[in-house]
Image (spheres, rainbow, N blue to C red):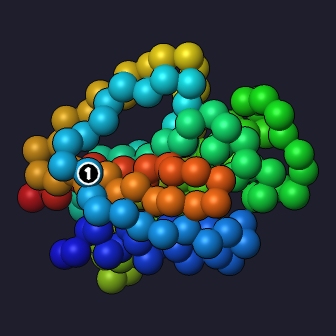
């Protein structure tokens, strides 16, 4: 399965249709970034046929600009609206990836989305099979979409 293409297709479609933003994918990162500074991460867990997580990471200024486009209201700090928006973005991206992982999507479940943010934080998850982190460039700046999966036997 071409994970990178699935991430690119889901991200470009959601950003163009839901946020009216054009994004350009970059090359997949060679190493996973687990440490974030002045950022926000929206994430959703994946369980069933596959287990893992999908996350969207953005620096605070990029996250505020994305949220402004998404909600149609000006945000000037990382507040509950930004956290909710990034959780919902993770949920939409996770739903799109879920559909690409399974023919019927009933054998894969997504968790309730969540978001973390702060001056400095670390996210640590160690899948045994697969991890892809794709950078995307927008007029607002660069953000990352990360997919970590382990296929269940």
As drawn, which residue projects farthest toward the right? 73
Provide residue 67's location: percent of width, then percent of height: 74, 49
Question: Which quadrant would residue 108 be assigned to in this image?
Answer: bottom left
| Residue in view at x 71 percent, y 66 percent | 19
- Quadrant of the frame with the N terminus: bottom left
Q: Is residue 32 above or below residue 10?
A: above
Q: Is residue 152 above or below residue 112?
A: below
Question: Helix, strand, or loop for circle 1?
Answer: loop
| Residue in view at x 26 percent, y 68 percent | 3
* Left or right of 149 in this view: 116: right
- For residue 145, say whether it is visible: yes
As drawn, which residue projects farthest toward the bottom? 103
Q: Which residue is mark 1?
A: 29
| Towards the viewer: 25 or 100 | 25
Provide residue 30's location: percent of width, then percent of height: 18, 49
Question: Which quadrant would residue 138 be assigned to in this image?
Answer: bottom right
């Amino acid at each position: 399965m071409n994970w990178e293409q699935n991430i690119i297709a889901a991200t470009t479609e959601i950003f163009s249709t839901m946020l009216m933003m054009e994004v350009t994918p970059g090359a997949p990162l060679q190493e996973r970034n687990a440490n974030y500074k002045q950022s926000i991460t929206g994430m959703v867990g994946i369980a069933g046929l596959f287990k893992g997580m999908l996350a969207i990471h953005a620096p605070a200024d990029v996250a505020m600009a994305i949220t402004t486009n998404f909600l149609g209201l000006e945000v000037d700090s990382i507040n509950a609206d930004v956290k909710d928006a990034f959780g919902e973005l993770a949920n939409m991206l996770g739903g799109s990836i879920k559909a690409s992982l399974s023919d019927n999507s009933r054998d894969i479940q997504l968790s309730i989305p969540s978001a973390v943010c702060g001056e400095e934080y670390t996210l640590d998850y160690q899948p045994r099979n697969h991890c892809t982190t794709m950078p995307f460039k927008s007029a607002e700046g660069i953000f990352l979409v990360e997919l970590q999966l382990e296929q269940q036997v």
